[in-house]
Amino acid sequence: MTNINKATVASALFLFAPLIAHGQIISGSATVTLTGPATREVTAQAEEKALRQLRTELLQWLSENAEISIDTANTVRNLGFNLFLDSCRLAAKTESSFKEKRLTLSYLLTAETIHQKIQSFNAAVDALALQSWNNLNNALKDNNFHAIHSEGITALFYALAHLGPPVAVPQGGRNLADDARRAVQQFYDKMEVKSSGLILSGKTGLAIQNPPVISLRIDSLPFSGITFTGRLQNGAVLFSSATDENGQIVFSDFKIPFVPNGTLLDIGPDAAPVLNTDGFLDPTLFGITLKSGQVQSFIFKIEKSLYSLDYQATSVSNITLPPEFANASHVKKFLEDSCYLQEKAGDGPVDLAIRVKTQVSSYTYDETEEIGIKVTTRIVVNGLLLHPPKTNKNLLVFEKRYGRYHIPPYGLYFWEASGKLREAIKATIAGL
């Protein structure tokens, strides 16, 4: 969930409304299978699943009974709805039961409670929207660009979070969201973004060579504090950084990711830090139009890093390791196909020395009549050509339990273990 003004929203929204015995019930339920005592982790898993179902039911109920449709495909609208979902969850009655090693958890809401939460939620986000709108107008009078940006985005967010017809500005009748959007659009229209170069050169997993610089200016003056986020074409976020006092972002600490040569990286403004929320918020999600150049497209020019691999897989139980797990070939294929590394040939130096020792064991759990299969893997990656050289270590423990009187699905288990192991190696390299 978002952290957007959490304390302020909580004080205004999360008023408990007692459930009424009669009337329509909206619920979200989930059942999880227990492999032992109902730990906090297992309970949290059930709560998360039940909340997802409650979310679906609420969206349908709002559409059918309150004529309120939420565009959850829009990240901004989705964040606003998640705030409303939080308030409903705290007002819901929670029921749980155990049966045959299964935990069932349910959130229950009456239609009356939901109506009350709509009213209290709207009152809270409207107050926050109006507060930021007033701050925005003061910033416009003072020509304070930093405040225009932050207060405008904040006013827009809370205005868009309102459930139902849009909020109007006081004594004007105009749409508050439109007013705030107009001010933010004028800010972006003044924004000029340039880069000293559009090529990101280097070896996979190592720092960029001759890193370029992004420069941001507002009315021809350097502008600090605006966050830019770099994303691949598939939407994966690689980094976020705010412009410094010179209005610049330097790629000096950025490493070449695990991508093929020629991959594109788009770097553009990100509104998420304004709202103190995770993830990436493209300004266009607020209805803002970005000019040409405000999103810079870089291309990776990659030279494959050379690696050496010391891989050992052993069993300290009666489990026979399948050849595809015991042999290093599956790791080498992953390093070359997914990490875009190249195995060293001959006696020359390497960029990355990778050592992997994995051990398979089995355990008996008498209290639950289960057997467990565990893979414990120690990974060490030496970045020998880094300046200075650096070592990163990782410990992976992957265990699954099965009924004692059933034959474990060894093929499926080792397939999953192989995937976990390979991703742990990739994460260890990335952590250098």
Image (cartoon, grey):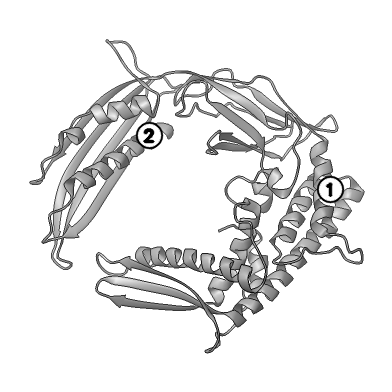
**At which x and y percent is residue 348?**
31, 10
Q: Name the residue: 72% across, 67% down.
A: 164
**Seen in the image, is 163 located left or right of residue 199?**
right
**Is label 1 in a helix, a strand or a loop?**
helix
Residue 12 in view (yes/no)? no
Judge by depth and name the residue closer to the eye, 196 or 84. Answer: 84
For the N terminus, the image quarter is bottom right
Judge whether 27 appears above or below 162 on screen.
Answer: below
Q: Name the residue: 34% across, 13% down.
A: 349
Judge whether 287 appears above or below 194 on screen.
Answer: below
Q: Which amino acid type is shown beneath numbered disc 1? A: Ala
**At which x and y percent is residue 402?**
19, 58
Judge whether 10 appears above or below 432 on screen.
Answer: below
Q: Which residue lies furthest to the bottom in this view?
A: 21
Work out whether mark 1 precedes mark 2 in sequence or the reverse, and give the earlier one: 1
Quadrant in the picture for residue 64: bottom right
Mark drawn on residue 426: 2
The residue carrying mark 1 is 183
